[in-house]
Amino acid sequence: MRFPNGWVAGVALVAGPVLLLVGTLLRSPYHFFFPDQLKAAAEHPALMTAAYTAFLAGHVVMWPAVAELARRIARKRTMWAAWGGVLVTVGLFARTFHAGVDQAAFNAARHRGVEEATRLVADGYGDLHLFSYLSFTIMFGWYVLAIGAYLGGVLKAVPAVALACMGLLPLGVLKGTELVSIIGTAGLCVALVPLGIRTLREQPRPSRKALVLAAPVTAGLGALAVLSTLG
């Protein structure tokens, strides 16, 4: 049995890119630099919360997608699969770390005002941390994975180039949308959504037992999610 299984991988290959594109488009009306992002968050809290939440969720969902892509590459190109998978996954961790800082900055803007939050972010923007040294993985990993996918016969030339476009996304804290952001996330959809659909079609139909168990398991996970917000 492989991990993640085909159903999880297939859903991730479809949902991850779509969530990233949605998050990118939702915050596209506002200038990409952090003072403008904080101002937009204060003036349009629901929209910006949805944008940043979708973008974060997309990166979290992407890990099974990357694992599946690396698994397929490894059939012919083991080293490209290993390096590409590891570098992109570390980059996903870095993006998730940045999202935590984004959330803290938005909270500061809501509770302390935009001006104070802007000063706070500006004062600490260049401070070093673990992911300062690993930021190259956010961009470079996609190039390695895209080359591996092409050489391994997983993606043809156009989807492979589209996958590599994810390396164009601006990195760092409170980065909004630029044209290259849309190109990158749209390219990810072009590269991975068809592969995700193909992966789902390859899976055997779920058994009746699995379908019966799905409802209580889903309800239980939902309850745990609610309880998690109380602690």
Image (cartoon, rainbow, N blue to C red):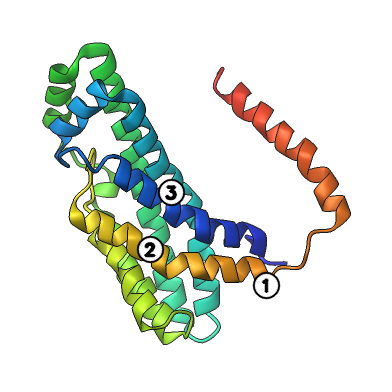
Q: Decide: is 7 above or below 117.
A: below
Would you call the spot at circle 1 few (<14 residues within 10 Å), some (14-19), or many (20 or more)? few
Would you call the spot at circle 3 few (<14 residues within 10 Å), some (14-19), or many (20 or more)? many
Circle 1/circle 2 CB separation < 8 Å: no
Write the residue at 17% across / 29% down: 121
Q: Secondary structure at mark 1?
A: helix
Q: Secondary structure at mark 2?
A: helix
The image quarter in which residue 186 lies = bottom left
The image quarter in which residue 112 lies = top left
**Is 66 left or right of 47, judged from the image as shown?**
right
Q: Secondary structure at mark 3?
A: helix
Mark 3 vs mark 2, CA separation in Å: 11 Å
- Residue 30, percent from left and from top: 18, 37
- Residue 204, percent from left and from top: 76, 68
The image quarter in which residue 147 lies = bottom left
**Is 216 left or right of 194, judged from the image as shown?**
right
Q: Decide: is 119 above or below 218.
A: above
**Marking on residue 19:** 3
Q: Is residue 21 visible?
A: yes
- Residue 142, percent from left and from top: 34, 67
Q: Residue type at mark 2?
A: Leu
Q: Number of numbered discs present? A: 3
Mark 1 vs mark 3, CA separation in Å: 23 Å
Q: Is residue 137 visible?
A: no
Write the residue at 27% across / 25% down: 44
Look at mark 2 in the image and give the residue it sits on: 188
**Marking on residue 127:** none
**Is 43 left or right of 10, judged from the image as shown?**
left
> Which of 83/43 is in front?
43
| Quarter of the image where the N terminus is located | bottom right
Look at mark 1 in the image and give the residue it sits on: 202
